[in-house]
Image (cartoon, rainbow, N blue to C red):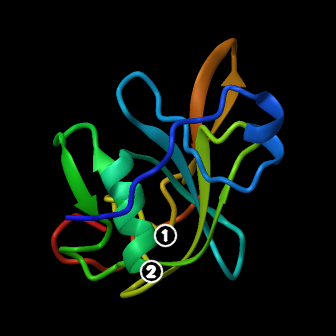
Amino acid sequence: MTTLSFPPAPSDKAALEEGAAFSPRFDANGLLTAVVTDAETNALLMVAHMNAEALAMTLETGIAHYWSRSRGKLWKKGETSGNVQHIVSIATDCDQDAVHLSVKVAGNGATCHTGRRSCFYRNVSVRDGKAVLIDLGMKPLDHKDGHA
């Protein structure tokens, strides 16, 4: 359990956008969007969600924690696979309703549950008037349990 808490967002827009207080604006479900990139390459790895506890655990431990919407519980990224995400830096956007985590991934470097380095391994395109997915050729890295 964490002891870190976050103040409510200020009503003053200037204080929110230019002030020094970190006051994350969680959505109606108590979640904050987290965009995750590789600290060395800046490659987009994943997008996830954090509740206040996950954000606090991430800040306190230096290891990425998220809220799993599908499992309804706190999730330490890489806990079962060993592909833990070590925080290099955390930034917030202008209105503090999203965070950007720059990470170094331990283990074999897989971030996606499919075993790939990134969850973004297909492009969306239009062919013959239909939206289709184009595989970018990212092959799964060697992993044992199906969870990155």
Horizontal and vertical percent position of residue 4: 38, 62
Secondary structure, mark 2, is: loop
Which quadrant is the N terminus positioned in? bottom left
Picture layout, residue 118 above or below residue 33: below
**Dot 2: few (<14), some (14–19), or many (≥20) neighbours within 10 Å?**
many
- Specify the amino acid type for callout 1: Arg
Give the residue at mark 1.
117
Q: Is residue 3 left or right of residue 146?
A: right
Q: Quadrant of residue 110?
A: bottom left
Find residue 109 and name its label.
2
In the foreground, 16 or 102: 16
Q: In which quarter of the image is the C terminus?
A: bottom left
Image: 133 above or below 67: above
Find the residue positioned furthest to the top. Answer: 129
In the rendered image, residue 39, in percent from the top left (x then y), is placed at 65, 77
Asked where in the image residue 126 lies, by quadrant, the reply is top right
